[in-house]
Image (spheres, rainbow, N blue to C red):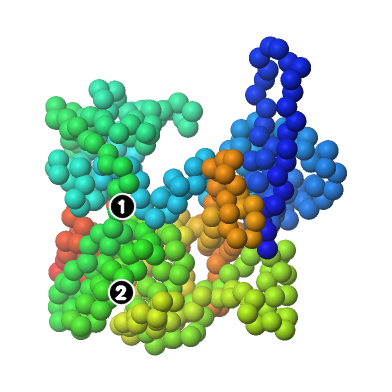
Amino acid sequence: EDRDDAIINIPADTSASTPTEPVANLEINDFIWKGLNQYYLWQEEVDDLADSKTTNAAEYNTFLGNVVDPSAFFGSLKHEKDRFSWIEKNYVELQNQLAGISASNGMKFYFIRQCTNCNEVAAVVTYVLPESDAAAKGIERGNLITSVNGRDLFYENEDNNNFELLYGDLMTYTVGLASYNQDTQIFESTGESVVLDKVENFQENPIHKNIILEAGDRSVGYLMYNQFVASFDDQLIQVFSDFASQNITDLVIDLRYNGGGSVRTCAYLASMITGQFTDEIFAQQKWNSKLMTYFNNLNNNSDPDDDRELNNYFTNTTVGGASLPGLNLSTVYVLTTKRTASASELLINGLKPHINVVQIGDTTVGKNVGSITVYDYIDNNGTINDTHDYAMQPIVLKIANSEGIADYLDGLVPNTALKEYFNDLGVLGDPSENFLAAALNQISGSGRY
């Protein structure tokens, strides 16, 4: 069906001879409203997204014109529960984000305050992408950065900080490194600085590390996986083929920095961890009531070709027909932090009714919902309106496991609680690293790590 076929023409005002206030682009705002009215998970709970809003065309156009900035208009329609929907001015940039493609120097980091009641902050490097500029210039996990281009990093509030120095569009910047004095609990500049250059269209390989470790008499596969990206499915399948051929007995999946991605890839990963549940339900999709009614009507009519599948299943093949190896495990160990979200949480929640999932680390984000990309299509053939480049990534569904469990807004709580500390991060994949050591100890029962 046509998701948005209304092109609103704005008559030109030729009477004004002096500069006027900015006006809203009704065409873009119309696209935003119609997309959210149809797909948004909380559509029924947002008064301004009610179907009746378009009953009076003049009032609807006035409503569209009340907010000039499309991003602000989008924000005005979000539900108070919604922490995750967003909109992009350029749909190509959105597509690249979802594919792990960006202008990047390869340095991944998060911010911490340098002291409890101060505004000075430090960026903590969590990992560095192989073959990136940061890797070439010696940036490592655990490095501390307290200045960029000679300016100290600070955070007072969301409206008063200079995080754009690292998060912004600068293609080149100079970072000042620091060390942490355990005795004085002060961050001290080392006097060393590094010039980092971003590379356009750098694509991160989400398979950051995969190795096999020994834990007593157990052979343990370790996979650090940082995003569910469909374009790397073949490489993920190869990792599990290698694990299977080397007869691993146990598996540790490191999702501590994985913010989610493709649900289909998540179902593939769950299927390869197991293998004994082919064609059983892995996850169930719960859309808004308008769409659930529409899908159920399609599924109950006389035409099987228009059916809409609302479940994700364990499988032994990809949609392209490639075989999936299965480890047939009855237990899997998953490492998590407060940056573990979405498809990562779905993997844990979806596996729980079927096998023992041992979660080690910190409580996860609590993103029990999924999104889709909504473009401004002007026909049923997928033609995108060429008068603007906006696209949305709204939350459209809640994802439950086979038992119907989907309510973990406060995050998934680990079996073994651990936190990452900036001054004791350890080396990813090293048996002595705190999170991995805890998993290996449970696997071997020896307490040696």
Q: Are marks 1 and 2 in contact (CB under 8 Å)?
A: no
Residue 442 visible somewhere in the drawing: no
N-terminal of the pair, mark 1 or mark 2, is: 1
Return the residue nearer the eye: 381 or 94: 381
The residue drawn where x is 77% and y is 38% is 61
Inspect the image, locate mark 1, and give the three-letter code of the amino acid beneath it: Gln
Q: Position of residue 275 (x, y in %)?
A: 37, 84
Q: Which mark is residue 449?
A: none
Image position, residue 111 (x, y; %) = 34, 39
Q: Position of residue 251 (x, y in %)?
A: 27, 74
Please give left or right for residue 193 compared with residue 27 in the image. left
Quarter of the image for the C terminus: give it.
Answer: bottom left
**Circle 1: is it few (<14), some (14-19), or many (20+) Cα within 10 Å?**
some
Furthest residue to the top?
Answer: 18
Residue that numbered label 2 is attached to: 237
Residue at the disc numbered 1: 203
The residue at the point 62 percent across, 74 percent down is 308
**Residue 372's spot in the image, x, y percent?**
54, 58
Farthest right residue?
56
The image quadrant that residue 272 belongs to is: bottom left
- What secondary structure is marked by label 1? strand
- Asked whether the viewer can see residue 387, the reply is yes
Of residue 430 and residue 380, the one placed in the foreground of this image is 380
Residue in the image at 60% along x and 60% along y: 381
Three-letter amino acid code at disc 2?
A: Ile
Label 2 element class: helix
In this rendering, the answer to whether 142 lies above or below 294 is: above
Q: How far apart in space, not on screen, are marks 1 and 2 (Cα)?
A: 19 Å
Above or below 397: residue 104: above
Q: Is residue 157 left or right of residue 254?
A: right
Decide: few, some or many residues near mark 2? Use Cα within 10 Å; few <14, some 14-19, many ≥20.
Answer: many
Q: Which corner quadrant holds the N terminus?
A: bottom right
